Amino acid sequence: MHQTLEKWIEKSERIVFFGGAGVSTESGIPDFRSVDGLYSQSYDVPPETILSHGFFVREPETFFRFYREKMLALDALPNAAHRRLAALEREGKLTAVVTQNIDGLHQAAGSKKVLELHGSVHRNYCQKCGAFYDAQFIKNSAGVPRCHCGGIIKPDVVLYEEALDQNVLQEAVEAIMQADMLIVGGTSLVVWPAAALVDYYRGDRLVLINREPTRVSGRADLVITDKIGDVLGVDAE
């Protein structure tokens, strides 16, 4: 299977990678839906509720306490999968990384064309004046982080009840439609509308690298159930 993957990568010129939380678990960032994931842990309020727009507005202090503890993994480093994808882009083979992750590890590995469907923890803006703040500022702040103008600073991440950036979404659709190979990795494909992006691929090199089956397992041209870092990282070093 790995040999087939490498053969297809060699033959392809417009590879797109579509990934989710499973890409970053090997960097020590917990995913959401696995047995040990964030949503399987016990909280007074479910994480899906805390990470919603309404909760952010109603209880910003509780939101930021959870956000700092669970969503800001600023010491995490790119793993072999991130590095391989960046290398494929440098070689002119990979045209885009489409990610549901907000950790910025693809960029840290050197990827340039990264379409962040759900935003990034590294961008934070004052809701009042629009001033920019980095992730470290949020991490080091106490309570509800506020701008010098007094406004509340909001992470540029897509919360539940919020819409995806339509420009980013359209770019992702176009990249996938033009791809001659689509590698889907580390995603359960249950978060919509992001999961629907896979349906725009019309080629015959749809690769799924995931530990568990997904809704595209039956129509993927190649399914690999090993760790994504082990699969993609073969030439990453």
Image (cartoon, rainbow, N blue to C red):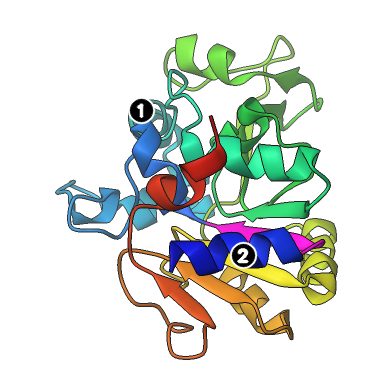
Q: Quadrant of residue 131?
A: top right
- Residue position marked by numbered label 2 in the rendering: 7
Report the Cα–Cα distance between label 1 and label 2.
Answer: 47 Å
Q: Is residue 192 visible?
A: no
Q: Amino acid at mark 2?
A: Lys
Furthest toward the left, the residue is 42
Q: Is residue 226 left or right of residue 53?
A: left
Q: Which label belongs to residue 192? A: none
Percent across and percent down for residue 98 are 67, 56
Which dot, 1 or 2, sits closer to the camera?
A: 2
Residue at screen point 43% across, 42% down? 24
Q: Which residues are magenta?
A: 12-19
Give 134 or 229, whichever is nearer the viewer.
229
Percent across and percent down for residue 73 are 42, 26
Q: Amino acid at mark 1?
A: Arg
Q: Which label belongs to residue 65? A: 1
Residue at screen point 47% across, 24% down? 77
Query: Are the residues tagged 1 and 2 within 8 Å (C-beta)?
Result: no
Q: Secondary structure at mark 2?
A: helix
Q: Secondary structure at mark 1?
A: helix
Q: Is residue 198 left or right of residue 21?
A: right
Q: Is residue 147 above or below residue 66?
A: above
Dot 2, crowdedness within 10 Å: few (<14), some or many (≥20)? few
Residue at screen point 65% across, 67% down? 8
Percent across and percent down for residue 27 are 39, 33
Does the stretch in magenta take in 143? no
Residue at screen point 74% across, 14% down? 149
Q: Is residue 118 visible?
A: yes
